[in-house]
Amino acid sequence: MPYVKRYKDLNTDLKVVYDDIKYELQTGKELNVVKEQDGTVNGVPFKSIFAVRESVPKALTGTLREVTVTITGMADDWLLEVHTGAWFNNMITPATGGLIIAGPLGGLAASGTAAVYAVKFERDLKNRIKEIVKKHSKKPYTEDKVETF
Amino acid sequence: MPFVRRYKDLSTNLDGLYTDIVRELQQEKDLEIVKETNGVINDVRFRSVTAIRATVPRAVTGTLREVSVTVAGDPDDWLLELHTGAWFGNMVLPGAGGFLIAGPVGTAAAAGTTTVLAVTYGRKLKNRIKELVKRHSGKKYTEEKVETFIS
């Protein structure tokens, strides 16, 4: 599930925020950064980074498949989008943690102890990005300067 | 929004199907294939391809950002997952076609005439894959052999 945050009145150094987020993705043990985009869209600076899972996972359902982070805007008004994709995430039965399918395909759902789950990765990344934004903003970070979509 | 389909009793040539899906992605000029994963998970065959937009888009909101297609299973019982991602897709106001934001960031939302929108591309690819499944299946394709899971 992607999420978007809008940050206002923080005077954020967006280049450094982007570089630190890139470092986070590069140091993720299962991830490989495969694409970066840097330019302007209708006169607004835009940076996006795309990382994919390096190898065949040990488990499939809910395992992290790809991550995209995008930053667009100016120092005092900008957007952050984080998307994490997971394989067959919508086959997990809500609330029970069970799976809709069984039979020959059910084996795909078996948990591997080393699996990197998208939901956990996204939670950790979100917290890390919050620290990074605080670190690279010249004005005080307060919750009322941040809007989540 | 990803969707998953389960196909049963079709005797589908999954290698042929996957190869044709990869070819479809290769033919889309705005896409670049960045990753293919092929292996076995818990004795189940698994193939996955991810393609992403090759260049900075002219417009952002709703523009196709990435596509991933996964095929897993055996010829008579297999799953297809199709995911199309869009930049800032959740900032489009449903029904109105408008945007939640304005101001300096709002211009990033302006539509370009040549934009490939994720929703349009996803629909097109879904229809194309249906044709490919029929082509590569040894048994007759009927709707009751197909089950769709949407979150």
Image (tube, rainbow, N blue to C red):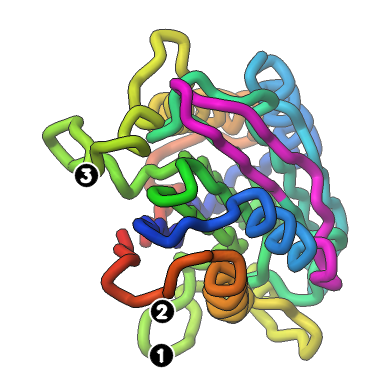
- How many labels, in total? 3
The residue tagged with tag 2: helix, strand or loop?
Answer: loop
Instruction: Kindly identify the residue that appears in the image at 45 percent across and 74 percent down.
Output: A100
The circle drawn on residue B100 is 3
Residue B61 x/y as whole percent: 39, 34
Three-letter residue code for mark 2: Thr
Instruction: Tell me if A12 is positioned left or right of B25 in this view.
Output: left
Residue B126 x/y as whole percent: 48, 32
Question: Nearest the camera: B115 or B133?
Answer: B115
Instruction: Kindly identify the residue that appears in the image at 48 percent across and 54 percent down.
Output: A80
Residue at the farthest top position: B113
Instruction: Kindly identify the residue that appears in the image at 66 percent across and 71 percent down.
Output: A63
Q: Locate the C terminus of chain A and report the quarter of the image it occupies.
A: bottom left
Residue at the farthest left position: B96
The circle drawn on residue A96 is 1
Residue B90 x/y as whole percent: 33, 49
Read off the chain for label 1.
A
Instruction: Tell me if A86 is positioned left or right of A114 in this view.
Output: left
Read off the chain for label 3.
B
Three-letter residue code for mark 3: Leu
Mark 1 and 2 residues: CB-CB less than 8 Å, in contact? yes
Relative to residue B75, is residue B64 depicted above or below? Answer: above
**The magenta segment:** A26-50
Residue at the farthest front position: A138
Residue B139, located in which quarter of the rendered image? top right
Judged by depth in the image, the label closer to the viewer, 3 or 2, is 3
Residue position for label 2? A93
Judged by depth in the image, the label closer to the viewer, 3 or 1, is 3
